[in-house]
Image (cartoon, grey):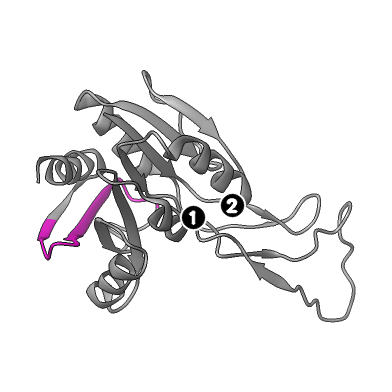
Amino acid sequence: MKVLISAGPTREKIDAVRFLSNRSTGKMGYALAEAARRLGHRVVLVAGPVNLPDPAGISVIHVESAAEMADAIHAEAADSDLIVMAAAVADYRPKRVIDGKMKKSDGSLLIEFERTEDILASLGKRKRPGQLLVGFAAETTSLITYASEKLARKNLDWIAANDVSRSDIGFGSDRNAVTLLGSDGSRFEIGPAPKFEVALELLRKITEK
């Protein structure tokens, strides 16, 4: 089985030295990639800018922006049997990137943003028969409500909901806990546990169902 996984944040340039990003470290996505390899699958990992070594035995594609992430994912998606979008992709990017380094002034700064591609929604529209599509819902409130809505709206097979407001399982933590929701009404509670163990159990639930 070919498994395609995304991990980490993206960076959207404001000028030559500044960018818009988020607190994702990529640890969960990398744990999923290593767990998929442990289960015997062929793994392609599309990773945003993270401070993690490339895992052995896994094809890693490094990207920076949401647009680069989209291009890499779409290039690998067609023949993938399982796609897990664990990356925290920017929803917006500056409409105009300033050449060079922007100089500060005494006045306010206004930056106009535009939407980036919703990669997960695009994958849901293009999903072929037999292909499994998994998303993540990193929320701070109404976890199950938002995750269930996202599961249906984006035509996913599964969604893993995690509460990133909790310091023990949020961004940067080595542990995680997720509620795994299936389009067939299935619900599984996984963790709290080390991220590799959560990843292993999550993939087992998805592939053995």
Image point 25% across, 71% down: which residue?
148
Which of discs 2 and 1 lies nearer the camera? The answer is 1
In the rendered structure, which amino acid carries the disc numbered 2? Ala
Image point 28% across, 62% down: which residue?
162
Image point 19% across, 41% down: which residue?
203
Q: Is residue 109 above or below residue 14?
A: below
Disc 2 packing (10 Å; few <14; some 14–19; many ≥20): many
> Can the viewer see residue 190?
yes
Q: Could you say whether the residue bearing mark 2 is in a helix, strand or loop?
A: helix
In the rendered structure, which amino acid carries the disc numbered 1? Ile
Residue tagged 2:
66
Q: Quadrant of the N terminus?
A: top left
Residue bounds of the magenta highlight: 172-189
The image quarter in which residue 56 lies = top left
Q: Is residue 14 above or below residue 197?
A: below
Residue 159 screen position, x and y as percent = 26, 59
The image quarter in which residue 197 lies = top left
Residue tagged 1:
119
Which residue lies most toward the top here?
57
Q: Earlier in the sequence, mark 2 or mark 1?
A: 2
The answer to whether 156 appears left or right of 106 in the picture is left
